[in-house]
Image (tube, grey):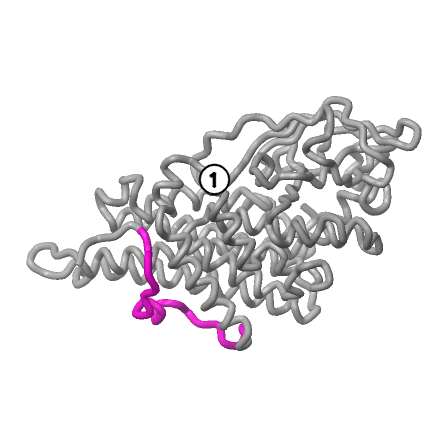
Amino acid sequence: MTHTSDRTSLDDTLDDADYGVPWALDDHHRAWQRTVREFCAREVAPGAAQRSIDGTFDADLARAAGLLGAYGLLAEERFGGGGADLRTLCVTAEEMARVDSSLAVTVHVQAISVALLAHLAAGRDDLLAEVLPDACAGETFVSFGLTEPTGGSDAGNIGTTARRDGDDWVISGSKQFITNSGTPFSRYVILFAATGEAAAGANGRSRRPVSAFLVPLQAPGVTVGGPYAKLGWRASDTHPLFFDEVRVPGDALLGEEGRGYREALGFLTWARFPIAAMSTGLALGCLDDVRRFVGDRTSFGSPLGAHQGVAFGVADIAALAATARVMTYDGAWKYDHGRPIAREAATAKLVASEAANKAAYLATELAGGYGFMQDTAVTRHYQDARILTIGEGTSEVQRLLIARGLGLPV
């Protein structure tokens, strides 16, 4: 048996390495998990390494994910969605990231953008009926336009502006690191822009209120910048967006003027759980590959896995993946059962993303020279892991949220 860089067929012998969470998953979750795992073995794993090396977004694979039903999991069935719960999305993110984090983040961003649009446009069934069915099918991508070139972790530091001009809004500014913004399916961005007059916030800083808009990417004045050359998530689509006096009708405003940012953050707290699930999947992907590798090789006359230093490293990866999984599904279960999850979301995202980075480091170390080669899965996992402690709020932001939840005045 030779070392292989990607899981191209189901390997049920590896399932005993998964730390089960039977209390968190029902039969329909496990059935869906099997469906996604089979999809990943059949459609995703072949070519995952080359897609990452080339940095290419695979439109056919994205369409296949749409046919699977991954994009509309959280949308209502009457709009073409799956009417599923958060645990279903977490299972999807975990299974996909176990093989290809680029596809996992493509699905994640589309799924949360669909859910956010449905939330912000609640009651506007005409708009939702126009956009959501194609968005759920993956024929229309809706990106999430919050991050600014100078904002960083200060997500509320919005320089993009929207001003009224008669019945229209005129938008100017720029966004960066916007996933799914330059694909053949990219049609809209949920854009956050400053509106109204500045007012002093709780910390004494003066800021303008922020509103949300649904902006067509084909509107005059919108420019999709070139793709970024990224360390990881290389086969996902990421571009900057530029807005030069972009005129949109008054009904492009989503929700109440001045409350877009607050609405989005309040609604998307749960979005940290799918990132934690991606972290879990990545750690499990590292475990899959390392177990194969140490089982295939001998060193000093013994199987590589028989050496205590190697075996302990594999055990550490398993423990990291198990910890990430428990934290992820504990929080997702609580959300699905209507319980508060603000601290749980921050904790799961912090613990799981840092566990994924540690697992990827150990996996590349245990793989030796193979862990330095671009065509091996552990190398791709190592590259993809780095963003997990940054996206959806850095580890420092998660610690800040946890500390505030404990009543500390930070």
Q: Secondary structure at mark 1?
A: loop
Neighbor class of circle 1 (other Cα within 10 Å; few <14, some 14-19, many 20+) is many
Residue 12 colored in magenta in the image: yes
Q: Residue furthest left?
A: 301
Say which residue appears at 72% left-offset and 48% top-offset.
131
Residue 402 appears in the rendering: no
Identify the residue at the far right of this view: 166
Q: Which residue is mark 1?
A: 57
Judged left or right of residue 18, residue 90 is right
What is the quadrant of residue 295 in the picture?
bottom left
Q: How many marks?
A: 1
Residue 402: image location, x then y, percent: 62, 54
Seen in the image, is 265 located left or right of residue 106? Answer: right
Query: Residue 374's x, y, as percent?
Result: 31, 39
In the rendered image, residue 42, in percent from the top left (x then y), is placed at 39, 58
Above-or-below relation of 118 to 394: below
